[in-house]
Amino acid sequence: MKKLLFVVLFALATVGASAQYKGDVVVDSLGGIMVKKGGALVLDGVKVRGHNAETMIPEYYDRWRKVNLGYNIGLGLTTTGCTLFITSAAAYMYARNNAPAPPSTWAELVEFYEHIKGIDSYRDFMPWERALIESARLKYLSFPFLVAGIPTLCVYNSRLKQLATDYNEGHRNQDVSLSFGGQNNGIGFALNF
């Protein structure tokens, strides 16, 4: 049971990190087309990163730096919030599995209350009681991370997509040519754009 719980928690904790590598667009990036794949922009098959961004996209570098920073902050906040919430759930499951049966008589209830009332420090709690307290703390600590992280991640994800769209629109092939020559049905003009 513990191994299964560990595998499930590990899988859930890594979902946020692996989501950034899923491709949003599958396009052959020939001819200088920029695509967004997960949390990265890809130009001609090369990821745009900090060490090569200034040379790959010099006119969009400042904008890319701000958008990339915002995306990474959103991803970090969301991943941290998810990890805290999953850890809270694990602590709660530990507490529920190791807690004694609830008091069934009045005498047991009074004895339990006296046990709680007589505790002077955190160390005097039973391990399952500490796990229950920590699960509540972690759960409430995870909410601000999730509330801040999810919208930040969504906003900067759309800004990364918009940056790729703006780059592609600004770097379209602007060559227009008019040629005169033989065609299949005779002689004519060909306008290529």
Image (cartoon, rainbow, N blue to C red):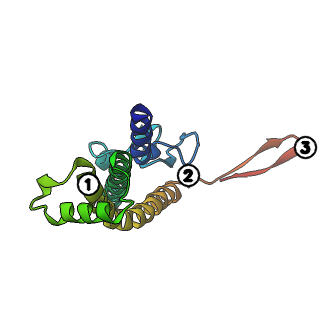
Residue 101, image x, y percentages: 38, 52
Q: Is residue 56 left or right of residue 121?
A: right
SS of the residue at dot 1? helix
Q: Which label belongs to residue 129?
A: 1
Q: Which residue is mark 3?
A: 185
Q: Rounded to the nearest whole Å, what is the CA distance between mark 2 and mark 1?
A: 67 Å
Q: Which residue is mark 2?
A: 173
Q: Residue at x 50, y 43 (%)?
A: 22
Nearest the eye: 95 or 154: 95
Q: Are the residues flagged by discs 2 and 1 in contact, CB closer than 8 Å?
A: no
SS of the residue at dot 2? loop
Residue type pointed to by label 3? Asn
Mark whose residue sits in front, 2 or 3 = 2
Above or below: residue 47 compared with residue 176: above
Residue type pointed to by label 1? Glu
Residue type pointed to by label 2? Asn
Q: Residue at x 26, y 61 (%)?
A: 112
